Image (cartoon, rainbow, N blue to C red):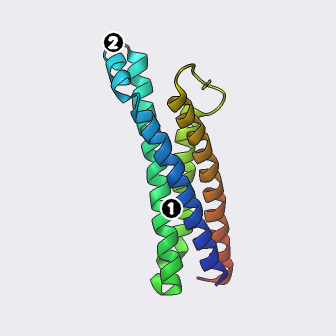
């Protein structure tokens, strides 16, 4: 029962992360046309556009897979197969770590400063930082469910 409650909390956290990811992506899409025009003339602009797209995609995928795995484990419980139950949490922890590192390399670390007259972009940047925090918590929660499953023998 305790493990199922942890999976329910993970699903809720992933839902919140999905909201942050959605807002970030929709705000960034407002600058897509301008970014594509710039990318035709600048290799750096092209690289920035590519990294923006790939990092947002990896964050959205990590959140979606985490949500689906948590819901599956919550609803199926121990009837979902012991091998899946034993491997899902460590695999999710590792996958989220990789997505988080990919996003953080591009978006974090003081590289980004708010841009004047680009409120939607600045909001997308803030939401991406929030997404990184959600991914941190999800990673820790999947590590916790790995330990609980290990000690309970699921």
- Quarter placement of the C terminus: bottom right
User: What is the spatial separation of the Cα atoms under label 1 and label 2, in whole angstroms?
Assistant: 38 Å
Q: Residues within 10 Å of mark 2 (few under 14, many from 20)?
A: few
In the picture provided, is 80 more to the left or to the right than 141? left
Q: How many marks?
A: 2
Asked if one can make out residue 102 in the rendered structure from this viewpoint, the answer is yes
> How far from the left and from the top, in percent, is residue 2?
67, 80
Name which residue lies at 67% across and 75% down.
148
Is 147 left, or right, of 12 in this rendering?
right
Residue 137 in which image quadrant = bottom right
Q: Which residue is mark 1?
A: 66
Which residue reaches farthest top? 41
Which residue in the structure is indicated by mark 2? 41
Q: Residue at x 51, y 52 (%)?
A: 19
Residue 144 in the image: x percent, y percent? 67, 67
Quarter of the image where the N terminus is located = bottom right
Identified at 54% across, 75% down, the residue is: 86
Most foreground residue, 93 or 18: 18
Q: Is residue 29 above or below residue 14?
A: above
For the residue labelled by badge 2, is the local secondary structure a helix, a strand or a loop?
helix
Q: Local crowd at mark 1 within 10 Å, few (<14), some, or many (≥20)?
A: many
């Amino acid at each position: 029962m305790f493990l199922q409650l942890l999976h329910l909390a993970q699903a809720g956290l992933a839902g919140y992360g999905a909201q942050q990811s959605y807002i970030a992506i929709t705000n960034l899409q407002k600058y897509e046309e301008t970014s594509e025009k710039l990318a035709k003339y600048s290799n750096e602009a092209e690289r920035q556009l590519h990294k923006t797209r790939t990092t947002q995609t990896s964050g959205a995928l990590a959140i979606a897979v985490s949500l689906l795995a948590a819901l599956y484990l919550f609803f199926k419980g121990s009837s979902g197969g012991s091998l899946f139950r034993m491997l899902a949490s460590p695999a999710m922890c590792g996958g989220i770590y990789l997505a988080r590192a990919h996003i953080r390399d591009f978006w974090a670390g003081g590289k980004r400063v708010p841009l004047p007259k680009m409120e939607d972009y600045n909001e997308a940047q803030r939401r991406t930082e929030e997404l990184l925090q959600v991914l941190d918590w999800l990673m820790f929660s999947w590590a916790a469910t790995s330990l609980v499953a290990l000690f309970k023998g699921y």
